[in-house]
C-alpha cells in the first residue's frame, strides 16, 4: 500500500539529508509503527507519504514514493486526499470548527461529496469512534483523548485507505493514549485501513503494532520487522 524506493530527502539549509536511500514497504491493512530518536526523519518520512514533502514543507525528494500506486511527488496532497488521511501532532492546532459534528463534516467538504453521503458518514464515524454522545459539544470542552479521536474522525470521514499519524499519543496521559490506540487498531481490523504512525515512546504502543519500522540514526537505513524482533535490536 505504501512503497519507498531509494528515497532521499534533503532540506536546503541542512548539512546532511534527513532521509538517505530509504526502501520500505507497508502492506495493506497493517498497523505500522515508525520509531527512532528525535530528529531522525520520522516526520519527513510521514510527510513524503502524505505529499507534504516536497509540496508544502520543502525538501528535495529523490527516488520514488507511491501510495496505493500513486506517486506522491507528481500528485499534490489535495490529489491524494481520497487515499491518504493525515493527523498531526497537535490536534487543537488543526480544528477549524466549533462542535464535534461540524468538525467531522469539515474534512469531507473539500471533496465535494453530496450532503446525504456526508451526513451518513458523520453518523458512521461518531459510532465507530464512540463520539455519538459528544456530537454537539464544543471541541474546547473535550479531554485530550476525545480531541484526538475527533481529529482522527475528521480524516476518517473521507474514507482514506491509508491513515498517517505523527505521534498521536504524545500529548496524552496513558488512559487517553490507550483509547486512541484501541480506535486505530479497530480501524485496521474492521475496515482494513493501513495505518502508519510515528511514536518516540515505544513501550506503550508496540503491543498494538503489526510491524515496526525503526530509523536507527540520521541517514541510516530503516530496520523493519515484527514488533518483538525490532524491540530486540
Ligand atoms: P523526527 O520527526 O524524527 O524528529 P524530522 O523529520 O522532523 O525528524 O527531521 C529530520 C531532520 O530534518 C532534522 O535534522 C530536522 O532538523 C530537519 N528538518 C525537518 N524539517 C525541516 C525543514 N522544513 N527545513 C529544514 N530542515 C528540516
Ligand atoms: P459512501 O459514504 O461512499 O456512500 P458508505 O457510507 O455506505 O459509502 O460506506 C461504504 C462502506 O465503507 C461501508 O461498508 C462502511 O462501513 C465502510 N466505511 C465506513 N467508514 C469507513 C472508513 N473510515 N474507511 C473505510 N471504509 C469505511
Image (cartoon, rainbow, N blue to C red):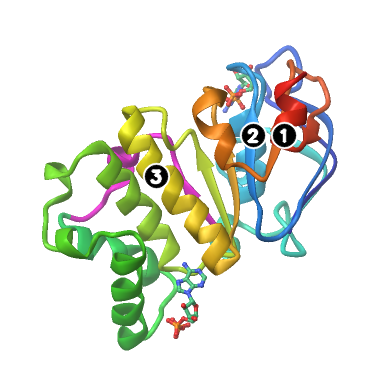
Q: Report how far apart the C-alphas of labels 2 and 3 lie in the structure.
A: 17 Å
Say left or right for 201 vs 220. Answer: left
**How many neighbours does mark 1 have within 10 angstroms: few (below 14), some (14-19), or many (20 or more)?**
many
Q: Position of residue 79 (x, y in %)?
A: 59, 65
In terms of secondary structure, where does tag 2 sit? strand
**How many neighbours does mark 3 have within 10 angstroms: few (below 14), some (14-19), or many (20 or more)?**
many
Q: Which residue lies at the image location 21% right of the left edge and 56% below the top edge?
A: 97
Quick one: label 2 or label 3, which is nearer the N terminus?
2
112 inside magenta stretch? no
Q: Look at the image and tell me in which quarter the N terminus lies.
A: bottom right
86 inside magenta stretch? yes
Say left or right for 120 vs 208. Answer: left
Of the numbered discs in the image, which one, if any, rests on residue 29? none
Residue 153 position (above or below residue 206): below
- State whether residue 54 appears in this view: no
In terms of secondary structure, where does tag 1 sit? strand
Q: Look at the image and tell me in which quarter the C terminus lies.
A: top right
Q: Are marks 1 and 2 in contact (CB under 8 Å)?
A: yes
Task: Tell me which segment is drawn in magenta.
Answer: 84-97
Look at mark 1 in the image and give the residue it sits on.
213
Say left or right for 181 vs 6. Answer: left
**How many neighbours does mark 2 have within 10 angstroms: few (below 14), some (14-19), or many (20 or more)?**
many
Viewer-proximal residue among 24 and 17: 24
Say left or right for 75 vs 222. Answer: left
Look at mark 2 in the image and give the residue it sits on.
34
Quick one: label 1 or label 2, which is nearer the N terminus?
2
Look at mark 3 in the image and give the residue it sits on.
180
Amino acid at each position: 500500500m505504501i512503497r519507498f524506493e531509494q528515497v532521499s530527502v534533503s532540506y536546503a539549509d541542512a548539512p546532511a539529508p534527513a532521509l538517505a536511500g530509504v526502501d520500505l514497504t507497508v502492506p495493506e491493512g497493517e498497523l505500522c509503527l515508525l520509531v527512532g530518536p528525535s530528529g531522525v526523519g520520522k516526520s519527513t518520512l510521514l510527510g513524503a507519504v502524505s505529499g507534504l514533502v516536497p509540496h508544502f514543507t520543502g525538501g528535495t525528494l529523490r527516488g520514488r514514493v507511491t501510495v496505493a500506486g500513486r506517486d506522491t511527488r507528481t500528485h499534490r496532497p489535495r490529489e491524494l486526499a481520497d487515499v491518504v488521511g493525515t493527523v498531526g501532532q497537535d490536534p487543537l492546532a488543526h480544528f477549524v470548527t466549533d462542535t464535534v459534528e461540524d468538525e467531522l463534516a469539515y474534512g469531507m467538504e473539500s471533496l465535494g461529496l453530496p450532503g446525504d453521503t456526508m451526513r451518513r458518514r458523520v453518523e458512521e464515524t461518531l459510532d465507530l469512534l464512540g463520539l455519538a454522545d459528544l456530537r454537539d459539544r464544543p471541541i474546547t470542552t473535550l479531554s485530550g483523548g476525545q480531541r484526538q479521536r475527533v481529529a482522527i474522525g475528521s480524516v476518517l470521514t473521507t474514507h482514506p485507505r491509508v491513515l498517517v499519524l505523527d505521534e498521536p499519543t504524545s500529548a496524552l496521559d496513558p488512559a487517553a493514549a490507550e483509547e486512541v490506540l484501541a480506535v486505530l487498531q479497530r480501524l485496521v481490523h474492521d475496515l482494513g485501513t493501513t495505518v502508519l504512525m510515528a511514536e518516540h515512546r515505544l513501550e506503550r504502543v508496540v503491543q498494538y503494532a503489526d510491524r515496526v519500522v525503526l530509523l536507527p540514526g540520521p541517514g541510516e537505513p530503516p530496520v523493519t520487522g515484527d514488533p518483538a524482533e525490532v524491540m530486540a535490536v
